[in-house]
Amino acid sequence: MQIRRIFLGNSEIQGKSFYSTDPEFINRVKNVLRLREKSIVQVFDGNGMEYFVELNKVEKKEISGVITKTQISLPTPTPEIFIYQAITKPLSKFELVLQKGTELGASGFIPLISSRTSQFEKIKYERWKLIITEAAEQCELGKIPELFEIQELKNLKIEEGLTIFANENEENHHFSEILPEIIKEKRINIIIGPEGGFDNDEILSAIQKNFRSISLGKLILRTETVALAIVSAIRLSHKIL
């Protein structure tokens, strides 16, 4: 039987004992996964440790169990990748980037507003955090990627790592040319524009900030595809180059 893996949230671990009154954790275990007494669940703390718990109490307001095994989580993939993604309409496209970006080992997400960002519906941070958490559970990430506050592209300042931005008008620098350089960095920042791309002022501003303009080729990709294509290439090439 497959052992389900869940982020422990506000649950408590004391020695060999596991205890939780966290409503979200209880709902996941009791109502979503339908686990009962004697079930084994794998919980992780987001700080590098995993615990296998045999449940001995599964109630409406309380879950407890005995820790039968501990292990170290998988290390965070390198380099760290932070995705600065323009908010999309519909938001489901942005949520796809959160989900799949997490599965590919992104370290964090920064929602962006640019000059061509379409009017979008109300932001639901808690829903976004849940999408990221569930993706981290599924792909066995030891650390849950961070979700940052919305930023405006025109005011964006990035002081760490190598920053690249996908520019459909770029003619001189293809992504593949700088990939060997990219994967040697400890942190990569990827800036992705909305449908319609960046305007001329945004491109000029990015270049003035020493962000690296790159092309992904002649095909025009949807905004939700671009970040995933870049992260996939970095992850796959990291073990090859």
Image (cartoon, rainbow, N blue to C red):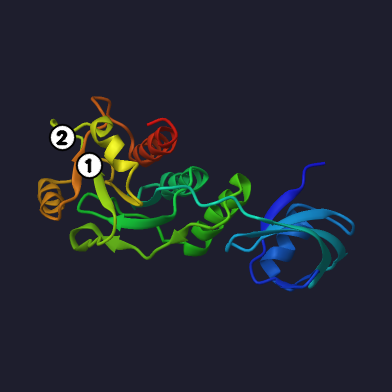
Label 2 element class: loop
**Which quadrant does the C terminus fall into?**
top left
Label 1 vs label 2: CA separation? 9 Å
Secondary element under disc 1, as helix, strand or loop, is loop
Q: Which residue was labeled with disc 2? A: 169
- Give the number of callouts: 2
Residue 99 lies left or right of residue 221; in this view the side is right
In the image as oriented, which residue stretches furthest toward the top?
218
Residue sitting nearer the eye, 175 or 27: 175
Q: Residues within 10 Å of mark 1 (few under 14, many from 20)?
A: many
Percent x, y of residue 209: 14, 55
Amino acid, disc 2 = Asn
**Residue located at (76% from left, 52% from top):** 33
Q: Quadrant of residue 237?
A: top left
Q: Residue at x 13, y 49 (%)?
A: 207
| CB contact under 8 Å: marks 1 and 2 | yes
In terms of depth relative to the viewer, which is nearer, 47 or 92? Answer: 47
Q: Earlier in the sequence, mark 1 or mark 2?
A: 2
Q: Is 87 on the left or on the right of 70, as rendered?
A: left
Q: Disc 1 or disc 2, which is closer to the eye? A: 2
Q: Amino acid at mark 1?
A: Gly
Task: Give me the disc on residue 197.
Answer: 1
Residue 123 point in image, percent of width and height: 42, 61
Crowd class of label 2 (few under 14; some 14 to 19; many from 20; radius 10 Å):
some
